[in-house]
Amino acid sequence: MEVGLDKYIDYKVKTVQTIKNNYGFRVILKYEDGSSKTQQRAGFATKKEAEEERCITIGQLKNRTYLVYGNMLVKDYFEHWYEDDIKKRVGSYNTIYNYGGVIRNHIVPMLGNKRMSALNSADIIRLYNKVYKYSESVAYQVKTIVNTCLNYAIDERAVEVNVADGIALPKGIKKKSYHSRVINTDKTLNHQQIVKLINGSKNTPIHLMVLFNVIMGLRCSEIIGLKYSDVDFMRQKLSVERQLGRDKNISKEIAAPKTYTKQEIAVKTYSSKRELDIPDIVFEAILKEKKRYETNKSRRKKYFQDLEYICCSSYGRPRGKTYHFKHFKQLLQDLDLPDVRWHDLRATASTTLLVAGFSPKAVSKLMGHSKEILCVDTYGDERKMAAIKLDRLNSFIESIIPVETKENGNELGAYKIVVDEYISATPQVEQMF
């Protein structure tokens, strides 16, 4: 939709005349490129009312407070904002997709045929109440979208004020602090369940994915985007540099076959790009996976895609964001574990560290959050500002995952890691010996 900013250089207001059995006048806006836009202000019962409104309009034009797009319908303006601002400014395909769905399915059906200048606080309250009955989480999204769009509309002279400003969601929704997240411990696994999950996953295709999630707290899209080049084998560190998902600039038609949802894109936020210590148990699993990778690469020379993804198929192809789902759900069922979501393992990692006394600030940094947004009742001591170091992290993991001994025979113990046992002929490793 062609809707420009309020950049008219001149204007002309026609005299009051009869328009469809009422009174009104026309406003002509002139722009630098020589074009002009005509707007009609009509529907006044008397000529006097139209004259008064004409004087007010001239004053608004002179002071540049005139609502250029005030007569636009809500559905048209929100579409314009979505296409001309959100799609160009927001980098995440998922955010763009979700915003579009909320606008089409919830905002437009309720307010779409109202004019922007006619919106009022009662309209917003009715919208919030209706959406809340449908879904609390969607209600939060609606509130964010409406406020962001109306603030944008003020700058574009579509509305005078943000009528949604200060309007709270229904009382059934507790107010959350800005950028806060309360971890629901009912949706996290305890120590014994963590051990059971890791042990049970060892012979499944998602073992390393489970470790990356429940031990290191990585997002699914970050896990499938990890490459061996992201691993510093000398320092035992991992750099989170990218994620796999849909690139908003690449359509399905131009994407290579089977890669549309596996494009390399930037991580979620600036803070999501981070360097993490790799616990011994995860480091060893990476080394074993690297050995399998080299074996498959040698065995399938003609068809193998050497893309360096750590979590990949036996042909080197990257995994999709839903690959883990059936394996994970089957694993939970077989092990008689709570039916948690995959993303709840990330909350499990956070909660476990917080319960162990790691500071919320350090855990937030590990998780890649832009701010300290973890809040778990009394978990964690905010006075402790120490970073999560490898030696302390390994010590903590050993406390919940027993060390392998001849007596207990635990298959997930702390092992002595010998790198060259698993990897050979890689430049980074050769420098180590």
Image (cartoon, rainbow, N blue to C red):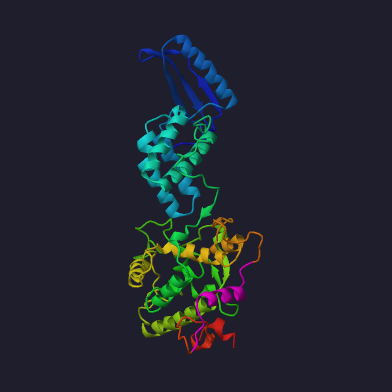
Left or right: residue 13 versus residue 313 is: right
388 is within the stretch colored magenta = yes
Residue 358: in sight, yes or no?
Answer: yes
Kindly indicate the quadrant of the structure image that contains residue 333: bottom left
Quarter of the figure with residue 396 = bottom right
Quick check: 16 above or below 106? above
Q: Where are the magenta residues, as a range? A: 387-405
> What quarter of the picture does the C terminus occupy?
bottom right
**Identity of the residue drawn at 48% across and 62% down:** 347
x, y percentage for residue 418? 54, 87
Image coordinates of residue 247 in percent, x first then y, are 43, 58
Q: Position of residue 331 (x, y in %)?
A: 35, 71
Which quadrant does the N terminus fall into?
A: top left
In the picture, measured across the screen, residue 433 lies left or right of residue 409, that is right
**Total numbered labels placed on residues in the image:** 0
Q: State the residue in front, 245 or 40.
A: 245
Across and down, in percent, residue 367 comes to 54, 63
Q: Is residue 203 magenta?
A: no
